[in-house]
Image (cartoon, coloured by chain):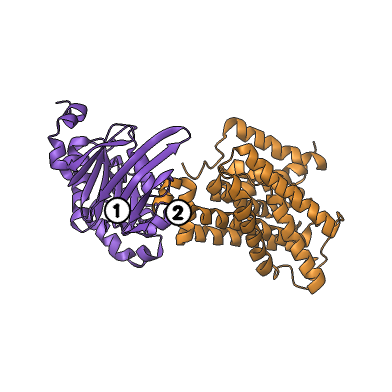
Amino acid sequence: MSFLKADEINVQYEDMHVLQEVTMEIDQQKIVTIVGANGAGKTTFLKTIAGILRPTSGEIRFLGDRIDHLYPHKIVEKGLVRIPEGRKIFPSLSVLENLELGSYLPKPKAKRPESLEKVFFLFPVLKERSKQLAGTLSGGEQQMLAIGRGIMSLPRLLMLDEPSLGLAPVLVREIFRSVREINKQGTTILLVEQNVFTALDLAHDGYVLENGRIVLKGKSKDLLHNEHIKEAFLGI
Amino acid sequence: MTIPGIPLLLQAIVNGILMGGVYGLIAVGLTLIFGVMNIINFAHGAFMMLGMYATYWLYVLLGIDPYLSLLLTIPLLFIVGLLIERFLIAQVLDAPGHNQLLLTLGISLFIENFAICLWSPNFRTLEIPYLQNVVNIGTVMISIPKVIAFLSAIIFTALLYYFLKKTDMGKAIRAASEEKEGALTVGINLKKIYYVAFGIGAACVGAAGTVIAPFFYVNPHVGGIFVIVAFVVVVLGGMGNFIGAFFAGLIIGLAESVGAAFVPGQVKQFIIYFIFILVLLFKPEGLFGRSNE
């Protein structure tokens, strides 16, 4: 039984086919990345797993159970947590309130103190700024807050949508370091990135999405040396 | 225009503040619903009227003290609001604004006309002996039921503020009002937030109806008088801004009452709309800004 399996997923907006026959398998404890250009359907795929979009056909199974018909909050309850593109933190709530809301559901709520400690250990700056309004944080700190809020939900699969977007290189490294650390502690990661090289360098497995279709998949080490990828993304 | 004497002016200020608190409570419910759901609830006045009738009948038929009836009218209006959201408003949340407007206006017309069928359009008043008293402080006469209404409005607003600030549910409501996608990612059930927020909004205005009933007539159309003012208050306070709405309620109450001391009776409504137009022209985000920004 696979950890997460998406089987021949199709997603349509009106008459636009955004995802076509996407099949993907994610193994437990791995870091899996989906790379591809803007508009390839990466965000759509994560939103579909999270239950925000419904596939027009195909099925998604988590630990053998179908989840493609569940409401978003039920999917979070199962431990599939998405950190959306653009962070989507709550700007007029304090940093601490943002984190508390990460553990809004009953099970995460029971572990709120332990989870908070974990987040503050991973991102000490959030502890310093816990009373500040989240909207006053810098871009990098907001991304840390978004990831921290995700950790508060006790994820079994953490889905990150473009966490490096708009950040300075030093902060990108900091964010990727934290992703590796979260993975080491046992959380499976699904990482969507435009930053192809860094993402493939971090991940175990990779998928390349082009115009809503998977055109390549494999060990990310192999993908890094793939001629098509070099040409399309790395400009080599 | 006449220049009022000092005693009359003091009287107007006291009356204005007392009524302003009630306007604040009505507007707080309206602004909460708007902030969370982006819906302008034209049925708000109908909810208030239901609160007033509930209090009236509980007193007339069962002899229940109007203030004690809050224990019944608040949950009653919460449930009415919740059910209306769950089964009607929820259907149009993604629809264009004019569809939402037609629905809430339709609900309002339905409730008001249903009230006419049930209770006739007659004006009724509660006559409660112990509330007929007036306290004199110097030259200023203070009506006891207005003071109670004002204090109740402060207490309910403070309780609601505490709920929104300190409880997980309250934080989830604030979170959902400013970042829907973020709320989904932490597992907040937005549908539930919507009907709870709508229920709370209805309960606020129901409570306002109850505390007004001891000194105001009850009639199926009575809600309209207050709710039009509440719309002005909501805009003045900054759409969706909770605390702003309460203070804007005080400002409008004062403006209306003090203004009425200067101009003949029927022209006093003019003052409120004059302020409304000024705000829309020069500070459309409201005096206190939108809470979410």
- What is the letter of the orange chain? B
Residue shown at 75% from the left, 37% from the top: B270
B163 relative position to B25: left or right: left
Categorize mark 2 by other alpha carbons within 10 Å: few (<14), some (14-19), many (20+).
some
Q: Secondary structure at mark 1?
A: strand
Residue shown at 30% from the left, 51% from the top: A5
Q: Answer yes or no: is residue A88 visible.
A: no
Which one is nearer the viewer's eye here, B15 or B82? B82
Name the residue tied to disc 1: A4
Q: Position of residue A116 (x, y in %)?
A: 30, 60
User: Are the two marked residues, 1 and 2, in contact with CB atoms closer than 8 angstroms?
Assistant: no
**Residue type at numbered disc 1:** Leu
Chain containing mark 1 = A
Q: Quadrant of residue A192?
A: top left
Image quarter where the N terminus of chain A lies is bottom left
Frontmost of labels 1 and 2 is 1
Considering only order in the chain, which callout, 2 or 1, is on the residue closer to the N terminus? 1
Image quarter where the C terminus of chain A lies is top left
Q: Answer yes or no: is residue A158 visible.
A: yes
Q: Secondary structure at mark 2?
A: loop
Q: Position of residue A234 (x, y in %)?
A: 18, 29
Residue shown at 49% from the left, 48% from the top: B177
Q: Colour of chain A?
A: purple
Residue shown at 86% from the left, 54% from the top: B121
Name the residue tied to disc 2: A71
Q: CA distance from mark 1 to mark 2?
A: 17 Å
Taking B48 as reference, is B271 above or below it? above
Categorize mark 1 by other alpha carbons within 10 Å: few (<14), some (14-19), many (20+).
many
**Residue type at numbered disc 2:** Tyr
Chain containing mark 2 = A
